[in-house]
Image (cartoon, rainbow, N blue to C red):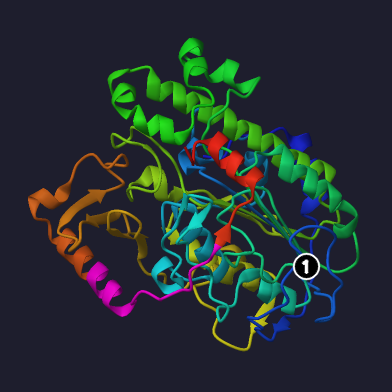
Amino acid sequence: MIRKLHAGIVLLLSIAILLPAGCRKKQDTEDDAAADEPPARGEPAARTRAEPARGPNIIFLTIDTLRADHLSCYGYSRNTSPFIDLLASRGFVFQNAYSGSPWTAPSMATLFTGLYPREHGVLHGRVAGRGIDSQEMISRDLITLPVALKNAGYRTYGISANGHLSKNTGFARGFDFFELHWFDKCPVPHITATRLKDELAKPGAFFLWIHYFDPHAPYMARSPWVDVYAKDRAECDKWAGTQMRELRSQLGEIRRNPAAAPALSDLYDSEVSYCDQYIRKLFEEVIPTNGNNLVVITSDHGEEFLDHNAIGHGHTLYEEVVHVPLIFVVPGRTDVPMVIERPVSNKDVFSTILDLAGVRSTRRIPGASLAPWMVRGAAADYGPVYLSLDRGRNWKGVRSGDMKLICTGRELKKCGVYNLSEDPGETRNLERKGTKTGEGLREMLTGWLAAKPVREAPVARQKLDRDQVEKLRSLGYLK
């Protein structure tokens, strides 16, 4: 349920970002999958490609570890996200959007390629030794979102605050400007964004992608919000700044202490509000107010606070780690807000952005565009949503309508079936009752797995310098 917002603030924002865009001609892209590599840091590269795009500016914001049900515009009881709520009040909220995987690299590769993780092959990877070890990279023969937009005439700018999303792993390809911040929190990428203000104001449409690292652990006690959210401030102070590696090592204590998980959740909520504040600053201080801005907000995955007796993410396919926000603010649309209940996958963000930008391709664009919901108020046929986790334990899942199947184990024999309309917390496994629904979902899942063999992607080699190693050690990734 979208919160009621002060009319004056809504009017101000609508003037700033949502004045009608008018008609635009579709732009062609030659699908150059081997687009020029961007500079790793520094000034934007000179443009030598297509004529300037005539579509909307595209502001694509991905927020690390943000679970949908901790945003107030998704019905959360706390007012954690007033500015995101403001955007949502002028746009389209996909109430049941899913990440293809519960950790960053495969999910973000899905957003960038329009392919499920097993189709693009970015499945593994971990921080180890002096590098990010065994992470696959996005293959150069796959067209990515920044490549497609650059070839359609967009000026492209990328800011990543997660080391898994780097030049070495293929996420910088297609950007005129790309800067990686090594697991830095909001102020650091925001400073880089402010340096781009004059660039973004130049004639011609731009694509700006920012990946914020907040509210990923360690959860800091962000003021003034923590003072409002903390039910037990002493317990919050005890856990503030604790690294995820240490939290997992103390999982037994967290389970035994009834105040621990709520305190971690309170800290997390303060981080959500902290990030929301920086997104507000981005629009107030950086984004041009020319009225033709397409804004897309989503997350790579969620986070668990003992919802299923664990902490963090990347180990299950339950709702708390795969249900993500997905918000589109489309220029020129005044019949909003609109909440869309149909389950959708983040793999379709790729084709939806190109569709709304008026970009067409000389080859098939993967995924199903969600634009019909926003343009005509109705969607074409949309199938089930599939989920996967290939790092560590083998997990696969599918959601169709209100029903969800999760299977795990080498042969996927251990399964759970849940009716999310009646059991949103996934606490009652209907598989034990031998439901026909479970059999149908299992057939869907096995058929999909058979039809989508795992792509063998190249493995990235990413060595770290001393500062990067120390940063990872301070975050608890390394001992």
Depth check: give the residue in front, 244 or 194.
Answer: 244
Total marks shown come to 1
Depth check: give the residue in front, 414 or 13.
Answer: 414
Q: Which residue lies furthest to the bottom in this view?
A: 362
Left or right? Give the position of 165 relative to 439.
Answer: right
The relative height of residue 398 versus residue 120 in the rendered view (above or below) is above
Which region shows up in magenta? 444-461
Is 449 covered by the magenta stretch? yes
Residue 108 in view in this figure = yes
Expressed as whole percent of the image width and height from the top left, the position of residue 14 reads 77, 48
Depth check: give the residue in front, 238 or 376.
Answer: 238
Question: Which residue carries the number 1 mark?
Answer: 176
The relative height of residue 293 versus residue 30 in the rendered view (above or below) is above
Depth check: give the residue in front, 462 or 32.
Answer: 462
Q: Which residue is drawn at 81% across and 81% down?
A: 49
Expressed as whole percent of the image width and height from the top left, the position of residue 396 reads 29, 60
Is 80 covered by the magenta stretch? no
Left or right? Give the position of 33 relative to 10.
Answer: left
